[in-house]
Image (spheres, rainbow, N blue to C red):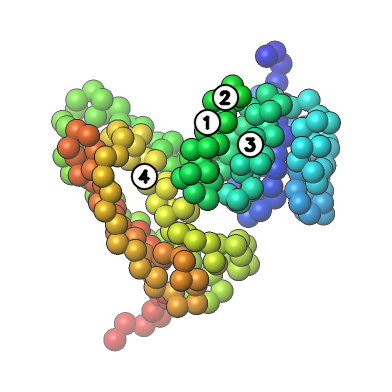
Amino acid sequence: MSGRLRVATAGCGYFSQFHYNGWKRMATAGEIELVAICNRTRDKAEEFAELFDIPKVFEDFELMLDSVDVDLVDVITPPETHSAKIGAAVERSVAAICQKPFTPSLREAEGLVADIAAGGGRVFIHEDFRFQPWYPKLKSLMDEGAIGDPYEIHFWLRPGDGQGPEAYLDRQPYFHKMPRFLVFETAIHLIDTFRYMFGEVTSVYADLKRLNPRSSPARTPLLSCSISRTAGAAYSMATGWPTTLPTTVA
């Protein structure tokens, strides 16, 4: 491949803005060229196209891939749409970046991975926690033997969002009833980071609870999890959202 990477995108939801801002910075630096955008609602795609200087707008993903010369497509859509879009990219020998979670189920993910391998596809799952600078730094210290072999690791996370009856309705309404929400949307980052730093997981134990009574019973806004790896280190993490934050303390 010569010249700049030609990038197309799919999706204009809340988190896509961070992707587009990154692609625009790279385009400004002359590293890539944003050539097309696709979204199920054209008005939003046209708004993003104007904002991020993208010349071609589509509502049909496959038509976009067939109409524009594309090296890489960034799939920034909900997980239930990923298999079809990634499959279409692989069929056309277009490399893809896919937002996490990869698919709604392990079975579907395994099937899609097999299809990608069979088709010679190149697909990267968009996981960003592992690239936060303190994690690579800590991993390099461990690889150098500077801090010894860890045998117990703990991680706690309490995001400030997801509270109250209107949680996410103004930005990502499908979150409100998403099955296994906390595991798919937050814990998956921590599990990926654990695997990056400490190796493959060998066993898992988890407690899940629903704290926000207005959310779907399928959602899990509190998670406590213990994970082990082959070398014997135990890893625990706790993450979740409180129902509300008190304004006064008695």
Choose the circle earlier in sequence order: 1 or 4: 1
The residue under label 2 is: 118
Kind of residue at badge 4? Ile
Kind of residue at badge 2? Ala
Q: Position of residue 86 (x, y in %)?
A: 63, 36
- Circle 4/circle 3 CB separation < 8 Å: no
- Circle 2/circle 1 CB separation < 8 Å: yes
User: Which of the two residues, 124 or 34, is positioned nearer the viewer here?
Assistant: 124
Q: In this view, does 64 lie to the left or right of 72?
A: right
Residue 114's mark? 1
Residue 86's mark? 3
How crowded pointer 1 is (Cα within 10 Å; few <14, some 14-19, many 20+) is rated as few
Q: Name the front one of labels 4 and 3.
A: 3
Q: Specify whether residue 26 is in view.
A: no
Kind of residue at badge 3? Ile
The residue under label 4 is: 191
* Distance of label 1 from label 4 (alpha carbons): 22 Å
Q: Name the front one of labels 1 and 3.
A: 1
User: Which of the two residues, 103 or 162, is positioned nearer the viewer here?
Assistant: 103
* Distance of label 2 from label 4 (alpha carbons): 27 Å
* Residue at figure coordinates x 46%, y 71% from the top left: 217
Residue 13's mark? none
* Residue at figure coordinates x 53%, y 77% from the top left: 165
Question: Which of the 4 image quarters holds residue 67?
Answer: top right
Give SS at disc 4: helix
User: Which of the two residues, 247 or 225, is positioned nearer the viewer here?
Assistant: 225
Kind of residue at badge 1? Ala
